[in-house]
Image (cartoon, rainbow, N blue to C red):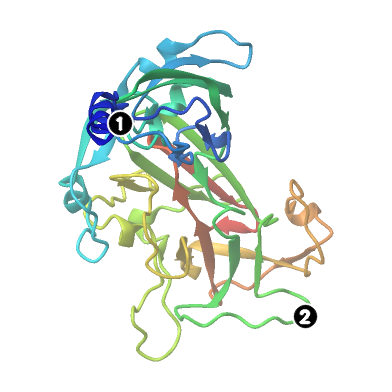
Amino acid sequence: MVIVLSVTLIQCTKVEKGYLSPTMAYSVSAFTAIQGRTASSYGLVSDGSSLPLTIELQHAYDSKGQIVDSMFTKTYPVTVWTAAYNNLTDTSFAAIAAKRTAAQLPPVIINPKSGVFQTNSATVYLPLDSYTFDLKVTNAQGTIVLPKIITMNLTSGKQIETAPEQGAYSVGRLIANTASGATTYSGAPGSFNGANNPFVVETIVRYADTPNVLTYTIRDKNGVVFNAKNGEIMKRPNSGLNPTPPFLQNLQDYAPDTFNQPDSGSLSLKYPLVPFPIASLGNGYNMYYRIPTAYVVIDSTTTWSSNTAGSYYKGSTDSHYKGAFQTDLYDYSVRLPLVVQVPGAYYIGIKLLNAKHR
């Protein structure tokens, strides 16, 4: 009789539908995102809560504590993948564009299962600030709100990375019409390679959100453009006997079907995605060029023992100036580091302070 009663009591006991922990948290409660780039947080630690979870944004707050939900619900056009990228076959704008499409997305997406925060290029439209979020979490047990559970610190960063992030500018001399570097003599360096290169001044302007285009111009110390279309900027030969590839990498290699040399003398291309380039073809993300001796006169200088940011070569008024090298002896070589991190239309101008167009 007792056994029957026990069974009856067990059969009448109400079974809970699951567990929803009030102490769910992120293992790291803040993450940093650079404006216009992708970044991710850690996932939400469920603390034993029954799965699956459904995680939604409840509220967003700026650093003043004001609710700014509309900033994180407004959508923008963001380019996304529709198929897997293959670096062996997806080597042209057309091949990559075929696997990409535009979607209307908010600047931050919360994965509804894991709680991972994922930023995208649309964060370029958000003010730099620290944003804190409330999350609403639901499972079979019910719903709970986790107040101000994670913070995103949105910071500024370079939209295009050159030196020092992706390498260093390098300028030097090649024996004319060869791949061979000129030797150093009489205190005149064959090249200068450094993050704060005293002979290179860069200007970068992002002038539109779309399309994704890049215009690159190389000028002499007087502002005269070296005209790529006229052969005044050429690929730099690779050294060695019958090297493979015969030329060091350059912009054309990364955008073979959109690269152009317009009448303005610049280097121009459309790029299909960011970061661009997405993968290196070798030697990091450095682009190599030479200016044939027929178009350039190069200053002779003494070796720079040190160089600090903002200290640039001043030509004949500089203490390092020793005169100009004899013409028809040397090509001018230049190495340009480059990665585009934020979509848009850009102009990049490079001025070579120890070179004069001839």
Q: Which residue is situated farthest in the front direction here?
A: 1
**Residue at left offset 56%, top offset 44%:** 223
In terms of depth relative to the viewer, which is nearer, 6 or 16? Answer: 6
Most foreground residue, 239 or 225:
239
Q: Residues within 10 Å of mark 1 (few under 14, many from 20)?
A: some
Q: Nearer the viewer, residue 263 or 344?
A: 344
Helix, strand or loop for disc 1: strand
Give the structural element (helix, strand or loop) at label 2.
Answer: loop
Question: On the picture, is 64 further left or further right than 61?
Answer: right
Q: Which residue is mark 2?
A: 186
Horizontal and vertical percent for residue 177? 44, 78
Q: How many marks?
A: 2
| Residue projecting furthest to the top | 66
**Residue 272 at what x, y percent from top left?**
28, 45
Q: Identify the residue at image location x=70%, y=55%.
A: 198
Residue 224 lies left or right of residue 229; in this view the side is: right
Amino acid identity at mark 1: Val
Q: Residue 128 lies in what quarter of the image?
A: top right
- The circle drawn on residue 78 is 1
Camera-side residue of 66 and 33: 66
Residue at the spot x=33%, y=23% of the render? 141
Q: Residue furthest bottom?
A: 241
Does residue 140 lie above or below 311 as drawn?
A: above
Q: Position of residue 138 (x, y in %)?
A: 34, 23
Say which amino acid is labelled 2.
Ser
Establish if 321 lies above or below 104.
Answer: below
Answer with mark 2 or mark 1, whichever residue precedes in sequence.
1
Q: Is residue 66 above or below residue 257?
A: above
Q: Please tell me whether mark 2 or mark 1 is closer to you in this view.
A: 1
Rate crowding at label 2 as few (under 14), some (14 to 19) or many (20 or more) other CA atoms within 10 Å: few
